[in-house]
Amino acid sequence: MLGNFSYCNPTKLYFGEGSVKHLADELKKYGDNVVLIYGGGSIKKNGIYDDVVRILSDAGKNVAEIEGVMPNPTMKKVYAGIEIARKHQADLLLAVGGGSVCDYAKTVSVSVNCREDPWEKYFMRFEEPDCETLPVGCVLTMVGTGSEMNAGAVITNTDRKLKIGKEFKDEKIMPRFSILDPKYTLTLPEYQMVAGIYDIFNHICEQYFSGSDDNTSDYISEGLMRSVITSGRAAAIDPQDYEARSNLMWTATWALNTLIDRGKTTDWMVHMLGHAAAAVTNATHGMTLAAVSLPYYRRIMPYGLQKFVRFAVNVWGIDASGKTDGQVAAEGLEAMENWMKEIGAVMHLADLGVSDDMIDDIVSGTLIMKGGYKVLDTDEIRSIIEESM
Ligand code: NZQ
Ligand code: ZN
């Protein structure tokens, strides 16, 4: 491990069936004014809203609500939320939902006392907050993003046709606590479950496919990937399999809570391509990643061949004997492709609503990252998008 780093993750987790009861203890740490933030209504249908509201009411909290936070939350919705949080003089932002709701809450948190335009400051200039931020708590209902234990937020600006992620450096932006009840995820539509499974897997790939030193992070990543593969298969066969769903929930958290990127440059190009595709289609996050992944990895494989060989052998169990490195690496990606199809991931951008006339916007909306095995140029990005169609 050759990098230098610090490590601190202050998010307190409560995991397991019924763990929402711990919300009562957490609420004691904050003032009376809570803003409850949720999505398009799933929590009202499956009873999670009632669970949370009962606890807030027993705690005597004064609650305002921000409802209707959409998947791929927009900046317009953020501006509206900032007003509500200001008016309510919020002491705590309580996100009940998936990554979209949690990211949204973090963005409101850093914006309530910000004197500049938050889109320009955080998502265009990638600056850090220099104002007081509000604490965020999370009750997670959808598994995949890791937003429950990180300081990331991804926001879409529909006018600008841009979807941009910002990872805040200050641990204060991470949720102060997150409640992870796997049972809460059992009502997810299968499409969302599968999107989440591939999102987890790809988060690990994005961190794994970088660097050439012997790094503990890579060994942890291989274990996490094997767990996602096993539990993903089991959940695809039986989405009500609690054991599989609970493993997926815990793995998702560890896949993107800053642990496995320690000492790594990290890649994140699949996410940049996926975000650009989502900015013009509003497609589901994990599926945009699935559609671009194989054309991307096949293109960069020669530049990081040894890591792709290791991936094939240690993650997919490919027998390397008598084969060239190129063959082993290719077999690893083939095994990954078969697994993605087996769990029901979307393998083509065209199936997510991308048409040929959108390709220019996707290419220009793709940020180029420099931490992976190959720094892409615009022509390569265009080819990858075309091959992903
Ligand atoms: O809005 P409701 O009605 O609640 O429905 C949601 C939504 O339609 C539904 N859902 C969630 N929990 C449910 C449920 N339906 C039934 N039962 C439940 N228990 O699922 C749909 C998707 O929810 P969403 O929050 O959008 O999904 P996800 O958790 O995948 O979040 C996606 C967003 O997170 C960003 C993505 O780019 C995207 O904007 N990401 C955030 C990251 C981070 N903070 O570190 C990293 C990721 O790579 C990702 O970019
Ligand atoms: Zn992701």
Image: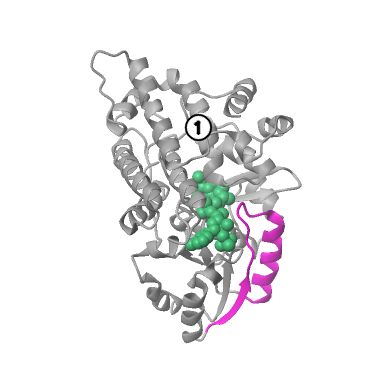
Q: Residue at x 24, y 13 (%)?
A: 322
Q: Nearer the viewer, residue 282 or 57?
A: 282
Most distant residue in the front direction:
237
- The residue depicted at 72 percent of the width and 57 percent of the height is 76
Horizontal arrangement in the rendering, residue 165 relative to residue 84 (left or right) = left
Residue 374: x %, y % from top left: 50, 23
Query: Image check: 130 left or right of 359?
Result: left
The magenta span reads 61-89
Within the magenta stretch, is there residue 325?
A: no
Query: Furthest residue to the right?
Result: 159
**Rendered image quadrant of residue 77:** bottom right
Residue at screen point 55% across, 71% down: 44
Respond yes or no on whether mark 1 lies under 8 Å from ligand 2.
no
Mark 1: amino acid: Ser
For ligand 1, which image quadrant applies? Answer: bottom right
Closer to us: 324 or 389: 389
On-image quarter of the C terminus: top right
Q: How is the image coloured?
A: one colour
Q: How many marks?
A: 1
- Residue at the disc numbered 1: 293
Residue 115 visible in the displayed image: no
293 with respect to 41 (left or right): left
